[in-house]
Image: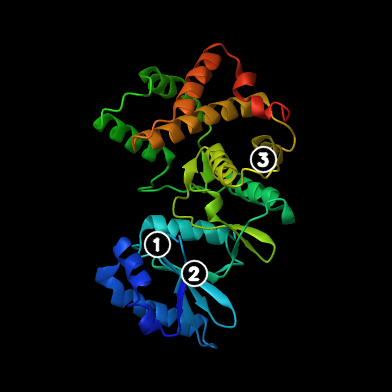
Amino acid sequence: MNGELEDWDDFIVSENFMKRVIENELNDQLDKYCDGVKKLIRNYLPFDDYKYCMIEGGHRCTFLISGNKKYILTICGGEESADTRNIIRIKDKLQINKAIVIYEDSNYCLMHFANRIENWEYGDYLKQAVLYLKRIHNCNESIIRTTVNDYRYLELKFRAQIERLNITFIDQSIFSWIDEEIIPIIDKYGNKLCHGDASYGNVLEYNGKVEFVDWELLKMGNPLFDIFYFYESLSSIYVNDTSILLKNILSIYYPAGINIENIENIVSMRIYFMFWRTINFAKSEIKNSEAISSLLNLKKLWEAGDYISVIKDVVEVI
């Protein structure tokens, strides 16, 4: 945490707070947002004196309010829109974040303080997280977004940047293969409600229960992107945690076993996710030679119909 301050007026002119305000372009309406914060505290947290500090690494303008209890408040600075109303409607209907969120609209999110999960074996957190996503994927709700920075939208941005910079270290045959063979399969299974940003960083623990937060990318899509994104983000940080294996996660997601249809989707999404991550690095002129080589090898295996080799690290599940 960065420097507790006991007074709100001192906090809002502090260097850390103003840096976050500027980063998120909230300067022009800061007085309005501050008035909103004061009203929220008066209405929902009326019985205490509070200290304030920024949260290190928090996105947007997110800070900690400490009194007898701790709370997190995010100034979202969003505009009321059909998208926002639909997200809040679905969250309410599915009872998402009901235990943790005290108040939420397009401008603010006030919630109880919750912890990052450090030990994924303790408390069955891995299973809870996977089943949490599965419940969202299997619900009957749907959403039509006017705009959303989903994985396909970002993929096109990555590719445009690669072309603009004339980056040539990715074999062009990979792009053709992804477009012609992989994406049609991804899209075939792309009609489920998805979190859209299911990184481990958006998973918190509150009273022993897992909560996914940050639902602004809620969308219809292929649910396995959520699963692969969650797995890849988690395994890249907790490299020594032997419970965090893709086969373990898929065993939780598919408790009755994996059928042929599931295999097709798993294989295609594994390839696509590797491609997506590779071009994400490439657009910043970072060459991941190992990933590029793996993609070329996967392409050969795919063309040979050797699906089991493509998903060799989950073969025990199958």
- SS class, disc 3: helix
Q: Position of residue 66 (x, y in %)?
A: 53, 79
Of residues 252 and 312, which is closer to you in this image?
A: 312
The nearer-to-camera label among 2 and 1 is: 2
Mark closer to the chain start, 2 or 1:
2
Residue designated by label 2: 1
Q: Residue furthest top?
A: 304
- SS class, disc 2: loop
Q: Is residue 24 visible?
A: no
Mark closer to the chain start, 1 or 3:
1
Above or below, 205 against 29 in this view is: above
Of residues 105 and 277, which is closer to you in this image?
A: 277
Residue at 68% from the left image edge and 53% from the top image edge: 125
Q: How many residues crowd mark 1 within 10 Å: few (<14), some (14–19), many (20+)? A: some
Residue designated by label 1: 60
Q: Quarter-wise, where is residue 267 in the image?
A: top right
Residue at 39% from the left image edge and 30% from the top image edge: 287
- SS class, disc 1: loop
Residue designated by label 3: 249
Q: Amino acid at mark 3?
A: Ile
Residue at 43% from the left image edge and 32% from the top image edge: 278
Gap between marks 1 and 3 measured at Cα? 30 Å
Q: Position of residue 189 (x, y in %)?
A: 53, 32
The label on residue 299 is none
Of residues 239 and 174, which is closer to you in this image?
A: 239
Above or below, 103 against 58 in this view is: below
Q: Position of residue 180 (x, y in %)?
A: 42, 20
Gap between marks 3 and 2 measured at Cα? 32 Å
Gap between marks 2 and 1 measured at Cα? 15 Å
Q: Amino acid at mark 1?
A: Arg
Q: Quarter-wise, where is residue 216 in the image?
A: bottom left
Apparent side of residue 312 relative to residue 303 in the rendered image (left or right): right
